[in-house]
Amino acid sequence: EFEFVSATAMIDMYSKCGALLSARVLFDQASSKDVILWNAMIAGYGIHGHGKVALSVFLDMIKTSSKPDGATFASLLSALGHSGLVEEGQYWYDEMINRFNIKPREKHYACIVDILARAGRVEEAFKLVKSMKEPEPG
């Protein structure tokens, strides 16, 4: 367990400092990866605007036995939104709900509204906000 915690902390630190290559080397060297480790790498790429790479890591994740969780999708949707990948963002938002059976929470709604608004689809974003169910906090 210590290996997971320290590897995750190091990946998070390297990512926040912009040392994505160092974060990726550590990630690739991890003997096994839990969802938290995957999330750290997806988030790392996302915060630096590398949405396509974050999506690639996510796709690798779903090929393994690791199951994405709400945090995974929050990081992925944020990464896609900040990279202007609107269609991909909408697709994975729908997949989160329909394929992975994850109920949207406030952070997911915020990401999808941001994705639409960044694409200039403000009317669509507004309609989504008006149609939202009361999200569970988190």
Image: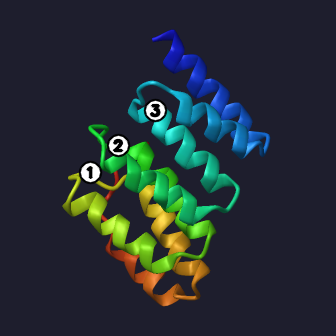
**Mark whose residue sits in front, 3 or 1:** 3
Q: Amino acid at mark 1?
A: Ile
Question: Within 10 Å of the Cα at label 3, are there few (<14), some (14-19), or many (20+) other Cα atoms?
Answer: some
Where disc 3 sits, the SS reads: helix
Question: Within 10 Å of the Cα at label 1, are there few (<14), some (14-19), or many (20+) other Cα atoms?
Answer: some
Residue 18 placement, left or right of 113: right
Query: Residue 90, percent across and down?
Result: 39, 74
Where disc 2 sits, the SS reads: loop
Name the quarter where the C terminus is drawn. top left
Name the N-terminal-most of marks 3 and 1. Answer: 3
Between the residue at mark 2 and the residue at mark 1, the CA separation in whole angstroms equals: 7 Å
Name the N-terminal-most of marks 2 and 3. Answer: 3
CB under 8 Å between discs 2 and 1:
yes
Question: Within 10 Å of the Cα at label 2, are there few (<14), some (14-19), or many (20+) other Cα atoms?
Answer: some
Mark 3 = which residue? 36
Q: Where 73 falls versus 91 (above or below)?
A: above
Name the quarter where the N terminus is drawn. top left
Q: Nearer the viewer, residue 19 or 84?
A: 19
Residue sitting at 31 percent across and 38 percent down? 66
Quadrant in the picture for residue 46: bottom right
Residue sitting at 59 percent across and 18 percent down? 6
Mark 2 = which residue? 69
Residue sitting at 54 percent across and 18 percent down? 5
Q: Where 16 falls versus 75 (above or below)?
A: above
> Can residue 137 be seen here?
no
Q: Amino acid at mark 2?
A: Asp
Mark 1 = which residue? 102
Between the residue at mark 2 and the residue at mark 3, the CA separation in whole angstroms equals: 9 Å
Residue 109 placement, left or right of 50: left
The figure's colour scheme reads rainbow
